[in-house]
Amino acid sequence: MGGQQADRGGSVVFQPLAADDPTTVAGYRLAARLGAGGMGKVYLSYTPGGRPVAIKLIRPEFGEDAEFRRRFAQEVRSAQRVQGLFTAPVIDADPEGAQPWLATAYVPGPSLADAVVAHGALPVETVLLLVAGMAEALHVIHGAGIVHRDLKPSNVLLAADGPRVIDFGIAHAADATSLTGSGVTIGTPSFMAPEQAAGRKVTPATDVFALGQVAAYAATGVPAFGEGTGHGVLYRIVHEEPDLSPVPERLTELVTRCLAKDPEARPTLAEIIRLCQAANAATVLRRPEDWLPGAVSAEITARAAAPAPPQTPPPPTTAPAAAPAAPAGYSPTVPAAPSTPPPGYGPPPSTVTAAPSVPAAAPVAPPAAAAPAPGYAYAPTQGPGAAGYAPTQGPGAPGYAPTQGPGAPAYPQQGWSGPGAPTGYHPQQAAQRPPGQQKKGGGRGLVIALAAVLAFAVAGGATAYVVLKDKDGQTSSNAGGKPNGKGSTGTQGSGGTGNGSSAPKPSTAPAPQAATYKNINLTAGYHLTLGDTDVRPQDGEDNGYELSYDTGGYLDAESSGGNLVLLDPGQAGSLEACRAETRFTQNIYVNKLSPGRQVCVTTGTGHLGLVTVKAFSPEDSPSTYMTLDLTVWRNAAPSTSTG
């Protein structure tokens, strides 16, 4: 994964930033534009220590696709494990940003596509060195569980010490979006494999076919299956043989074997390197100083002279405007002001001035209410005079919201609902005024109204105490009998439970039952749905499934909100263990598993599963699969469990 290409032909290496280009990406100051493609634009930047990096900024259309983001994040995690000599390592990324991006090491060299367009076909010795280096790169990429899927000349950079394979895994993320079928082209038809063109399963052998096409292109200057419309090229790839007559004789066996229609007939990467060594003993890349023609090496020298990043941030385009003053004595509730972004990054500073946190004139506190009698069941935050009464929820509090207390429309339903709530009160008849203003001559009326409310509260509290005490006595004397009278209705009238009048009863729901499925052979490219009564492998690996065995070599929690946890060796898996675990991941590579290891599965639909690995398919098996036992507790995930 990663990418850095200049315009075809290499006429302009470092393009100046255009008006629609950003000046920074997540703190990386951009110095120039390196190129653009179907996935987005590539820019030159630098680390704080001065090392040049290539920043790929994904197109906004892809960033709006949730499935692309999920796959992109997954591919970034995989790509960060790829540390090969012939790859450009991914050093930073943000798949969750407003516009996803990733950063790779900058490679000062042209792409193979640019070099061939500008200087023609490469010598046989150079092609052999190129193919051997690409094979080593693919070995590391495949070892991380990634199939490149888009290996082509523009994704191979020519550095002074050998090739660099880039953009591995991005095509897989792009396949998830609807954009690839609506005018956005990801991948080049001339370099696809037959199974890829036909929509069949993609495997590491797919990259071997593309490697053969790249070798033929480098040696002849034209694609092996010709040029033309995408549909025509794809038809020839699937149904016809390539024209290899222009390919030099020393490369014929290598290219012919790589371009076999049957994936099983193609050579392994180790065999490809042996074929290169047999054709030319120098293909172990021991001559980095002269492996490329002189004209191509000159381009590397030009690209090494990268422009320096801007030293000072650009000035703000507009000065922040002064905020209007808040009314005297008024203290509205406002969100905290966001932190100031670093200079030159992010939007201009907010133009909103926070209102004063303390009102200019402190309101008069209401008289203290009498303490409730012992056993008073009224929820203390719901009425005046209660312990811990929140001042914004009763009359006389600063910034009092009229929908939460006396004076609000439909007061008995939305405001104070405790015992002794006043009756016959019609707040819709009272004029509502902005905070800080009072009706002329209304100060005395407010004091009288508050006194009346408090009197009702005290009287209601005493009534509630008597009723609840009587109810408790009846309950004690009639243990096991049916509750008596209105006290059993749970309403907010006198004697009811009200809001929070008693502790909730513990759930009596039964513990989830375990369903066990033995000796499941889960084939790569298939998935399991834990909610099925009969859990069995079904074809498909990338469509929101609950657990799939991806052909890339990993178990994947596909469903939205799902996750996996790999339990430690010797750790006993159980419902309690899986509920308690928080070491979540989206995928687990099979090479981390061994017989006896266990994996907790949480699905987005609320089920819990425990996978116990038993065995893997033998090397001579025609299919790749793993044998496992599965225990499922349905509707038992911590967020949905009722047991």
Image (spheres, grey):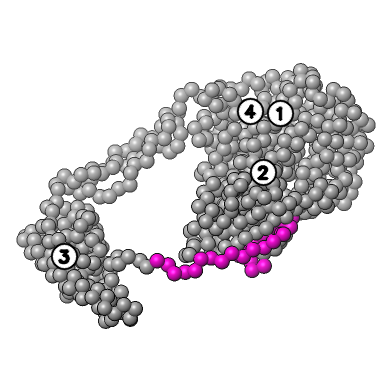
Q: Are marks 4 and 2 in contact (CB under 8 Å)?
A: no
- Label 1, label 3: how far apart the Cα atoms are: 79 Å
The amino acid at mark 1 is Leu
Q: Which residues are magenta?
A: 506-534
Q: Earlier in the sequence, mark 4 or mark 3?
A: 4
Residue carrying label 2:
592
Q: Picture coordinates of residue 67 (x, y %)?
A: 60, 52
Residue mark closest to the camera, 2 vs 1: 2
- Label 3, label 2: how far apart the Cα atoms are: 64 Å
Q: Is residue 447 left or right of residue 215?
A: left
Secondary structure of the residue carrying tag 4 is loop
Q: Is residue 169 left or right of residue 363?
A: right
Residue drawn at 62 percent across, 45 percent down:
569
In the image, residue 525 lies in the stretch drawn in magenta: yes
Which quarter of the figure has residue 245?
top right
In the image, residue 510 lies in the stretch drawn in magenta: yes
Q: Which mark is residue 373?
A: 3
Q: Which mark is residue 85?
A: 1
Q: Which mark is residue 106?
A: 4
